[in-house]
Image (tube, rainbow, N blue to C red):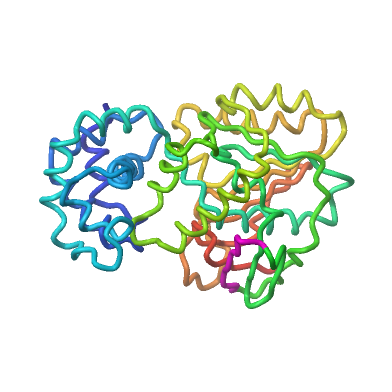
Amino acid sequence: MRDRAELRRAFAQQTEFARSPLYCVLSQVVAGHERLLDLAGRGRPGQYPTFLFFGAVHELLLGGADHPLAEFYPSVAGPSARPAAEAGPALVSFCAAYETELTKIISTRLVQTNHVQRALGLRLGLSTIAAEVPGPAHLIEVGASAGLILRFDRYGYRVGGRQYGDPGSPVQLTAEHYGSGPLPDLDVLPRVASVTGVDLNPVDIQDPGARRWLEALVWPENQDQRELLTAALAVVAADPPVIHRGDAIDVLPDLAAALPAGRPRVVFHAATRMHVPAQCLDAFDSAILSVGATGPMWWLSVEDSPEPDPRPAPARPGPVLRLRRPDGFTRTVAVVNGHLRWIETLPR
């Protein structure tokens, strides 16, 4: 059970649901309700309690749970969904009626949001290093979930009004481009020798229940993201990448040792390190660095806010796309939206 004060702050002071009026309302309801906080605190260490709790509620509703709360969810009720401001009492009633089912989900599931849009972060990072990677690179994603980002080369991209990637793909990712720094050509990429994922609990893309959990982690109002997810699941299901089950701290050293010595490798993760328990962060970072023990490694990540912010007049808050080169030199490539809806490139 998580610390009660920490739990209350997570729901009371959340900012991640700015685009979800329903979750903004319901977060305050949970923060002020002791039994709901008890329920939300039953997740595994390291899991974001807000994402996990609302994902569990959403999964049951998407699965057909018969309760008035469904009337407030646009993902279930559609355009006729009731006003979010009135949903509080229905949430309390729903959690009382489905406490057993919610406890099972919250205590066993992992937050695996796998936003398809984050494939743009990987593609931007790869295009940034394309000229310096000597030969085909082995790509490893940590926190790969269902492997949707690893199939970044099967998607189309429209950034700042320019088209990249596959224009005929059913998955088309669109983002705004800001900043004075040049945008690299997203069609110039290093050759990729192999793609591999690592995840604590890989999502079986052929399992309808597992796919519904990914859908449940999409906010109820976000129909565009839900449609992108559905399209990407279909693309990846036709050719799923290899994903190794286990903790990256344990898996990465052996995975790296199996790569051809001297061959380049790229490690990528987005919104993964944020779920690692604080006492394990050093070991997590060391495991990633171990991938570079037998060959040059480029480390790309989308995790932390810029500190200090490299922009002279920051107008858009967001994490950074960070690059660490084989020689240890680290720089911020861009400041980005957490779901890669926009990127702000920086002067070199």
Would you say residue 10 is visible in this rendering? Answer: no
Task: Give the quadrant of the C terminus.
Answer: bottom right
Q: Find residue 233 and report its horizontal and vertical position in percent.
A: 55, 48
Number of residue marks? 0
In the image, residue 18 lies in the stretch drawn in magenta: no
Q: Residue at x 72, y 40 (%)?
A: 195
Task: Give the quadrant of the N terminus.
Answer: top left
Q: Nearer the viewer, residue 100 or 114?
A: 100
In the image, residue 170 lies in the stretch drawn in magenta: yes
Q: Nearer the viewer, residue 184 or 6?
A: 184
Image quarter of residue 118: bottom right
Outermost residue toward the bottom in this view: 161
Q: Find residue 200 and report its horizontal and vertical position in percent.
A: 52, 29
> Where are the magenta residues, as a range?
169-178
Q: Find residue 99 and report its horizontal and vertical position in percent.
A: 19, 32
Q: Find residue 142 and report its horizontal and vertical position in percent.
A: 60, 37
Q: Residue at x 50, y 70 (%)?
A: 314
Image quarter of residue 54: top left
Q: Nearer the viewer, residue 22 or 71?
A: 71
Position of 163 relative to 224 (above/below):
below
